[in-house]
Amino acid sequence: MTLAVLLAASAASAACAGAPTVAVDVGHGLKDGGASSARGRSEFAFNQALAVRLAEALQGRGLGVRAVNFAGAISSLAERPQQAAGSDFFISIHHDSISQSHLQFWDWDGSEASYTEVKRGFGIFVSARNPDLATSLRCASSVGAVLRRVGFVPTPWHGRKHLAADAENGVWYYDNLVVLYRTTLPALLFEAGVIKHRDEELELLDPARQERMADALATGLAACLFVTEKSVRE
């Protein structure tokens, strides 16, 4: 599915009645590409590719999708949750890096590039300042559990700086993330993997792996949101 077709389908699915709607936010953008991978690719490019697959997977499970920043034009962090208003859940898609002190250097395509060998794996963040922390935590744990069940491994690295919300499933508190607390929605931020890790970078570029990860994300969110919707009705 092309980006233009996806955006049109997302606009239609966001308006569908009777099913929860997930706002899918592509982290960073054209002006601020985010981190650079070990081979110099922008984080935004990784984020966009996975977000497109996630939107398709969510639609395949009967969920509505509201596409946020898929074209990379949004520069304001606060504008992202504003555009998600009216949805039932907000997920921001990112890929991880590492601090300068843990970087090594190598020659890539004739230029010096940085990489790491000490950090890899996914991470999920929630904010205790979010207006619906209970749903945020429930869905984050659901997503993490499904990811682990299909073979993805969370990184323990975030335990160096963040309090665990559900460490077994890769969920951590990051209270001051604007996209997580300046919203009216339950929300999580997903770090799909570490693009500074040379091996994991190549894995994250694999379309089949992207589909498998998107499927796991959609499965976890659908399980959480349909249960939440049922409990609200009752």
Image: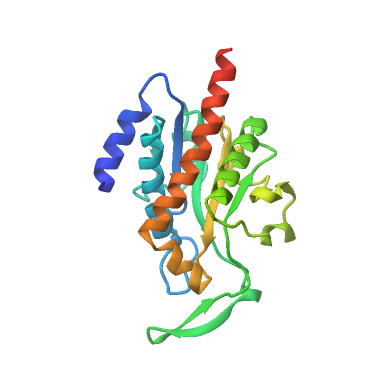
Left or right, 131 with reference to 163: left
Residue positioned 56% across, 25% down in the render: 227
Residue 127 in percent (x, y) is at 66, 41
Q: Quadrant of residue 186?
A: top right
Left or right, 30 with reference to 182: left
Residue 7 in percent (x, y) is at 30, 40
Left or right, 41 with reference to 89: left
Query: Is residue 171 visible in this depiction of the protein?
Result: no
Residue positioned 57% across, 42% down in the render: 188
Task: Give the number of callouts.
Answer: 0
Quadrant where the C terminus is found in the figure: top right
Residue positioned 50% across, 66% down in the render: 195
Above or below — where is 144 with respect to 185? below
Above or below — where is 30 with respect to 185? below
Nearer the observer, 61 or 140: 61
Residue positioned 49% across, 74% down in the render: 198
Residue 94 in percent (x, y) is at 50, 54
Residue 13 in percent (x, y) is at 34, 29
